[in-house]
Image (tube, rainbow, N blue to C red):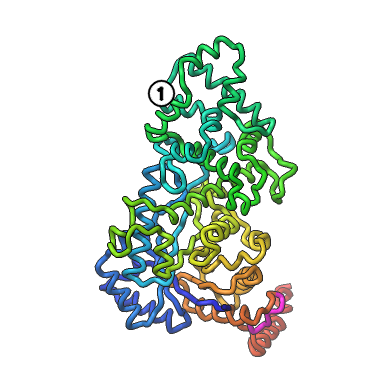
């Protein structure tokens, strides 16, 4: 398949039943070259607005439009906090069901991760929003039970002993001695590239009578089990560190796809906390430890997002909306309904979070789609404006894309700065074409080329010109003058103007 569809992005606020101008705008967009409508809704509750369904019916039956839906509401699937996880999961189920049922959407797009990275190391402390709450694993189960099922108890109790004691409010001299000893032994083990071990640390106590007496007061495993029963309360950074260690120790495919094969997350965090900056053996172009840690966080975030689509929680299911659907997973639903999901590149929340989103660049998003289902029912909505806000060098990112990973990109929002549209005689014709051409060379054979409907209608026409040259596989340097709307008459006019004004600077001399 080799096709690009010109689509207009329509804010649902414009669809007012009493305001006919919105329908005129839609009709004009369709008449001037748009072949698709992307309806953006700020709130999930917008699915149930009475007037909206009639407006959509008008678009589908009268205008013969095809439609995709995008939700810009907060629907973060990367959180490990129990309350946030459940709330986001309910929103995901609702969004998938209503967007198919009411709008018969050709695809559903949303921002899968909008939160900043959790402060796993001292360098990220300025991003800290300390919140101790029950934590869950990627599929929404109690984090402590996950640790138990993954056979990580011995490691967890050795490495995160402080977390257990503090969250059970155990504060005394004996507990402090145990914590300080375990943390010291953990640092030694990590420095030697060994895994911290509760059994080993207990043996290392040896003849230290003070520590032996302190340890005799507590059964660490029993305390761990009590912490699990208490909801596995911790901070999100703790959950991310635990899942990262699990992905590393199990040689998870996602971990390897992020090129983190032999990278121990504990070692990276420890080196950053010691003040080390550069990892000479890094395979990444950016050899800083901080960059590697960000990739680790991205891998964990992808694992949490993936978990939402594979979860079978009976208390939150499609059966609530339709008994015939039963307790199927979110991924089963999009396959059954034949409705692809596009993960849209998000923008930073505020001026402090640029470059610090959990999913930051193009590679992070493509690996998310790849690991969910190899792009069969998932893909990427590449919002160029949001990437720039997140300080991503788009052209550099595209050049560094591996293989034909451009196949995961199913929509490109070409709006860049304040939605200016594309004028044929502007440099933006070249810049947008250059980006799309590079993506095509990386495997993007099908995509919706989207622009805000508030832009000039000229944009749809110019996108058709861009598409024509993309299908011809014309390199950016080979684009003719006609691509920019320059014909013989216009060129002659330019030459005449130049000649007439050549000596104007000498008039007053």
For image coordinates 60% across by 66% down, the residue present is: 406
Does residue 63 lie above or below 312 as drawn? Answer: below
Left or right of 415, for residue 473:
right
Question: Which residue carries the number 1 mark?
Answer: 169
Q: Position of residue 76 (x, y in %)?
A: 43, 51
How crowded pointer 1 is (Cα within 10 Å; few <14, some 14-19, many 20+) is rated as few
Q: Position of residue 291 (x, y in %)?
A: 63, 45
Q: Position of residue 185 (x, y in %)?
A: 61, 24
Please give the range of residues in magenta.
477-484
Question: Would residue 478 be seen by someone viewing this image from the given angle?
Answer: yes
Left or right of 410, for residue 54:
left
Q: Position of residue 338 (x, y in %)?
A: 42, 70
Quarter of the figure with residue 224: top left
Query: In the depicted view, which residue is nearer to us: 248 or 484?
Result: 248
Residue 481 part of the magenta segment: yes
What secondary structure characterizes most of the magenta part?
A: helix
For image coordinates 54% across by 64% down, the residue present is: 382
* Helix, strand or loop at mark 1: loop
């Amino acid at each position: 398949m080799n096709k690009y569809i010109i689509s207009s992005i329509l804010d649902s606020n414009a669809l007012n039943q009493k305001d006919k101008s919105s329908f005129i705008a839609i009709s004009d967009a369709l008449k001037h070259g748009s072949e698709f409508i992307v309806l953006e809704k700020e709130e999930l509750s917008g699915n149930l607005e009475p007037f909206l369904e009639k407006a959509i019916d008008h678009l589908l039956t009268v205008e013969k439009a095809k439609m995709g839906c995008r939700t810009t509401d907060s629907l973060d699937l990367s959180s490990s906090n129990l309350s946030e996880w459940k709330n986001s999961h309910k929103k995901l189920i609702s969004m998938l069901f209503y967007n198919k049922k009411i709008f018969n959407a050709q695809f559903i797009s949303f921002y899968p991760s909008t939160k900043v990275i959790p402060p796993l190391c001292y360098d990220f402390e300025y991003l800290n929003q300390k919140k101790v709450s029950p934590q869950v694993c990627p599929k929404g189960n109690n984090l402590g039970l996950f640790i138990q099922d993954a056979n990580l108890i011995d490691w967890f109790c050795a490495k995160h002993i402080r977390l257990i004691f503090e969250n059970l409010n155990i504060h005394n001299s004996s507990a402090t001695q145990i914590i300080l000893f375990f943390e010291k032994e953990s640092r030694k083990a990590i420095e030697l590239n060994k895994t911290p071990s509760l059994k080993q640390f207990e043996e290392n106590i040896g003849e230290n009578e003070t520590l032996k007496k302190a340890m005799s007061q507590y059964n660490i495993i029993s305390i761990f089990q009590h912490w699990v029963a208490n909801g596995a309360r911790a901070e999100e950074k703790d959950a991310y560190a635990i899942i990262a260690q699990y992905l590393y120790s199990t040689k998870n495919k996602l971990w390897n796809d992020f090129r983190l094969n032999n990278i121990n997350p504990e070692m990276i965090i420890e080196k950053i906390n010691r003040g080390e900056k550069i990892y000479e053996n890094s395979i990444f172009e950016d050899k800083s430890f901080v960059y590697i840690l960000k990739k680790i966080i991205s891998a964990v975030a992808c694992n949490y997002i993936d978990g939402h689509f594979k979860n079978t929680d009976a208390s939150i299911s499609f059966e609530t909306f339709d008994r015939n659907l039963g307790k199927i997973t979110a991924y089963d639903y999009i396959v059954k309904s034949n409705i692809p999901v596009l993960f849209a590149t998000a923008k930073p929340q505020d001026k402090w979070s640029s470059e610090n989103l959990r999913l930051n660049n193009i590679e992070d998003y493509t690996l998310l789609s790849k690991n969910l289902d190899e792009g069969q029912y998932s893909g990427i909505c590449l919002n160029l404006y949001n990437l720039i806000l997140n300080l991503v060098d788009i052209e550099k990112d595209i050049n560094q894309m591996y293989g034909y990973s451009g196949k995961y990109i199913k929509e490109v929002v070409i709006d860049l700065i304040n939605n200016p549209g594309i004028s044929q005689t502007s440099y933006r014709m070249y810049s947008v074409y250059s980006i799309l051409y590079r993506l095509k060379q990386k495997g993007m054979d099908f995509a919706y080329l989207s622009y805000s409907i508030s832009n000039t209608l000229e944009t749809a026409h110019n996108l058709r010109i861009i598409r024509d040259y993309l299908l011809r596989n014309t390199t950016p340097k080979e684009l003719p003058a006609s691509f920019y709307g320059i014909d013989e008459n216009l060129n002659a006019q330019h030459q005449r103007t130049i000649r007439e004004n050549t000596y104007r600077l000498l008039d007053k001399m």
